[in-house]
Amino acid sequence: MIINYGYRDAQGEYRITVDTDKCNGCGACAEICPENIFELEEDDYDEIKVVVITDKINKIGYLCPGAAICASRQGKNCHDVCPNEAMSHSW
Ligand code: SF4
Ligand code: SF4
């Protein structure tokens, strides 16, 4: 299942997309995120998947500088460490 977290506002579109069929719940994205945007949660099928923390969904455009800027700052971002290409950003 494709899940989109985020919103569109006057500044642009800020969505983090997770393909839960590809996510294996390894937690690598959560570990590397400097803004602690992610957490792991059990889904309805008792499988661990990553989610965007509920309180942060409406702020992700402020919290996260965007995938490219994040990678330039710290070498890798949440996409780079994902073994299954389960995650993408709209910015
Ligand atoms: S790009 Fe960086 S700051 Fe943004 S969600 Fe991924 S790891 Fe976190
Ligand atoms: S790094 Fe990829 S596979 Fe691992 S929890 Fe994050 S989205 Fe899922």
Image (cartoon, rainbow, N blue to C red):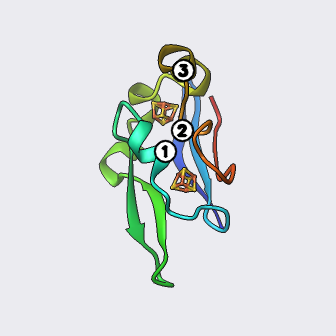
Residue 7 coordinates in the image, percent (x, y): 53, 41
Marker disc for residue 75: 3
Furthest-bottom residue in this view? 45
Query: Does 13 appear above or below 41?
Result: above
Residue 16 coordinates in the image, percent (x, y): 57, 44
Residue at the (45%, 54%) spot, across then down: 27
Q: State the residue position of label 1.
A: 29
What secondary structure is marked by label 2?
Answer: loop
Which is more toward the observer, 58 or 91? 91
Marker disc for residue 78: 2
Cα distance, mark 3 to mark 2?
A: 11 Å
Marker disc for residue 53: none
Residue at the (61%, 39%) spot, across then down: 79
Q: Amino acid at mark 1?
A: Cys
Tell me whether circle 1 and circle 2 mark residues in contact (CB < 8 Å): yes
Q: Residues within 10 Å of mark 3 (few under 14, many from 20)?
A: few
